[in-house]
Image (tube, helix red, strand yellow):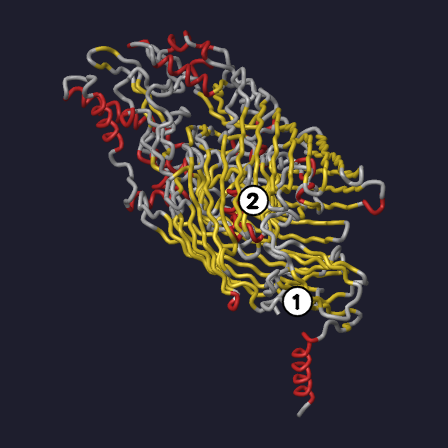
Amino acid sequence: MNFFTKAFKTTILFLALLPAFSYAQLNGSYILSGQVNDDAGHPLIGSTVSIKGTTNGTSTDTLGRFSLTTNAKLPYTLIFTAVGFKPQEFLIKNVNSALNIQLVSQSLLINEVVVTASRKEEKLLRSPVAIEKLDIKALKQSPGASFYDALENVKGVQMTTTSLTLKVPNTRGFNSPNNFRFMQLVDGVDMQSATLGVPLGNAIGPTELDIASVEITPGAAAALYGTNALNGLANLITKDPFKYQGLSFYHRTGVNHVDGIGIRPSVITEDAFRYAKAFNNKFAFKINASYMQGEDWQSNTQLDQNPGNLKTANPAYPELTGAANAAYDGWNKYGDDALAGSNTVVIKGITVNGVARPNLTVARTGYNEVDLVDPKVSNLKFDAALAYNLTPTTQLSYSYRIGRMDGVFQRGNKIALNGAIVQNHKVELKGKDFLVRGYVSLENTGDSYNVKPLADNLDLNHASNSAWGTLYKNALTAYANANGGLTSANLVAATQAARTAADAGRVEPGTQAFNDLKNTIIGINNWDIKSSLIPNAPVTGGAALVQQSRMYNGEAQWDLTDKVKVFDLLVGADARVYQIIPDGNNFVDFSRPITERNTPLSDGSFGSDVYYKKFGGFAQITKTFFDEKLKLFGSVRLDYNPYFDPKFTPRLAAVYSVNEDHNFRFTFQNGYRFPALFEALSYVNNGRVKRVGSLDFINDGLGYLGNSYTQASVATFNAAVNAAPGSASGTDATALANRNLLQVADLPRARPEQITSYEVGYKGILADNKVFVDIDAYTNTYNGFLGQIQVYVPNGVTVGSDAAVLAMLDINRDPTTATANNAASLGQSRYRVYTNAKNTYHNYGSSAGISYNFYKRYTISGNASFNKMKGQDAADIFVTGFNTPEWSGNVSFGNREVVKNVGFNIVYKWQQAYLWESPLVTGTVPAISTVDAQVTFKVPVYNATFKVGGTNLFNKRYIQYAGGPTIGGLYYASVTLDGLLSK
């Protein structure tokens, strides 16, 4: 027997005897071991064990056993936690015997600790602001198909689903699919995609197996988190590789589109794995990966947002209403943008029943979204982390995260994501009283494209607007000649025949010609619609979304409580730099001449990179009085952006605890929000309408700030001009007679958006720990609200002049030649500008939640939220879009273990109908009423959990926002194998 054989056998014998020892000396360290059971005496698998105030921690194996290597000095406190059980602390004075711990089951979150509200640990009940926490138990009990769906059931949260792969939460009003006012963090990393302008928390965030908890703070959090957290934030916290070790697998198979409307029933699959391992409580790593694929929810609402009675349509043609509307502008149709005054032609000289009618506005036919976007979507996620404990209280870690996704989201227009990739690298040094973190986020949009210019250029490849208008007019005249003139009886048929004739030869969905042309257009990185000036010109405009950027973020915080002693003091600072690579369509090099910004250089680039920066710092003081019954919070933050003056953000809060079970709070907060990257620096080259950022220098040479008319007034002006009878319709004389209808925009210089918020609330435990109550009420005031307004700039002339008035006419005219009725005109340039509202906006609301553990482990919970915006005395320059139902809520009923290893949960959700306003679609979102449910079955011997459930069980199709996808039932079955190889 050689030396190596002896050594191997000795090692095996040592490992076999190791569990029998309660501790062993290891280079100054020792092993602490024991057993954790539930209140029935059964082993608790996966419960966590940690030494209070240190980075030391581990988890129990399949037999409820744990072992923890530490060199902590005695005495110290061990903290035991498990899903569905009350946390327990145990004082360790010596290590001469193994521990045997029994945890007491708990159905309500009444002893939870949160970190998001104050950036340091504190009891949930004594948080100074409204905060909701979903732990692993709540996430697993959710009937949603993924853990992220559980956020929809949180009190006060409004979820916007833009795609299977993309969900955007919001709280307290002013919702949008690219929500700049609600921050999403994953382990401290901001998930807001800079250049895409949309939060990607569920697209590149944690997998189903690695999520530990979610904390949501509704309302302003800018005093501690900076200028993005104006409406609130969600903090997604992943599992510590020291505490959650082992190998885990997850698989889900589901089906949606079960009614076959618009798309066949489709299978959704998701697979994930996680592996984590720790070595002697010094070094640990974890790896996560997941892949989801399916057929997306489709946006195919065919409602008309420009009905015939509107001025932007044809109120003088009552025959052309409903399906016959010649100026139809569908919710989910593009290229027919009559409401925005784009993609329309004006037909003059129409006589019906022998009487001259005003000009007829006709929208181009356009294409439906379902024909432009592939419903197949997928989401690939991977992340890895390394952690090293330098000391028992100090940890150095590195993490890498990457996500690749398809799907659809809405910015100003719908964006079809195809292989978009976002990566981030994070390095963090964390100690008992300090934290230093740095990360970089990298974006690449892959083969993504903008849906609107795709539709525009598909139509324009067939014919320019003027050429198409001529075809339409000729066909209408031919129909009239063949049928004895136009009459009220045949006008519908005549206009339909004219459209068919004008569209003859255009590519149609489902044909190879359509697919080939579509692929050509989405491969062109130039959205200019130059072909609109040339009849039957080949495609010169594209739809490709080519964006790349980097975001660098550094931050630090230091808890000085031990040094100050008089009060708790927390200070911090952060810096962020965005680096954007100009693409010629969304972001440009502003140092280049205006005429060259969208033209590539000889090296293929569009100029030098663009940088956008902001810096900030904060200090927070906390002090308790009256035997810790009263806790006062005071914080102040300073933020600086080189384009704006520095802004101070204060927060004052008080929490009064009558006793541990009854806690009242009051909070005052002020907050500022600098324009997000897209709001500040965009230069979107989108055909006839250019979307531009809010910074002053972008206006140089364009003139939209001080030399423009509002879109609404131009629409009213043209409606009046076109409504004139007979030969007067559309003439210069009629235009000049209606010049007073034009309103000069007079846009203000950009400034940060400001919020002032007051909040009161109560958290309490009643009925011998069986009832948990959480109530809050708030009022917000927004000053300088940031939004978009479309304006028209008269080319080469000044607003107010006759030439500027004539430039606003919709009728196509030669830029150099005058006619008998119309002067020459250089026309107009259209801009959609990010700017500040002139009015001050007030909204207020309240939410209440209650959970009742009424019998054994049976729990019923419910919450309701009320949100309201105060009306305005005068119209603003743009519509702010409160976009929030007045009343919403849900009720759940469940038991995580109704019989041994079997649990269930049922959730009923509802919300009122409400008005959704956006530059793309404005309309009413109908009321929503759905039922979700799930049943779980555990097989402990195999560490397996089976889950069967469904969302929207009765398949009541609904939309969450105007222009968004129609969501139906989703039914699924999943299996999770957890904690394998944990020891």
Query: How many circles with numbers are drawn on the protein?
Result: 2
The residue at the far bottom in this view is 1
Looking at the image, residue 280 lies above or below residue 823? below
Residue 852's disc number: 2
Mark 2: which amino acid?
Tyr
Checking the image for residue 49, the label placed there is none
In the image, is residue 195 above or below residue 758? below
Residue at horizontal 62%, vertical 53%?
A: 425
Q: Is residue 238 left or right of residue 709?
A: right
In 3D space, how far apart are the residues under numbered discs 2 and 1 (Cα atoms)? 31 Å
Res 832 visible: yes
The image position of residue 563, as x and y in percent, is: 85, 46
User: Could you say where residue 545 lies in the image, as x and y percent from the top left?
Assistant: 47, 42
For residue 94, what is the image quadrant? Answer: bottom right
At x 40% / y 26%, what residue is drawn?
342
Circle 2 crowding by C-alpha within 10 Å: few under 14, some 14–19, many from 20:
many
Instruction: Give the secondary structure at mark 1.
Output: strand
Query: Foreground: 301 or 555?
Result: 301
On-image quarter of the N terminus: bottom right
Describe residue 884's horizontal placement relative to residue 276 as left or right: left
Q: In the rendered image, which residue does mark 1 sit on?
A: 35
Mark 2 or mark 1, whichever is nearer to me: 2
Q: Quadrant of residue 839?
A: top right
Q: Position of residue 870 (x, y in %)?
A: 55, 22
Q: Earlier in the sequence, mark 2 or mark 1?
A: 1
Please tell me whether residue 723 is drawn above or below residue 436 in the rendered image. above
> In the image, what residue type sits under mark 1?
Gln
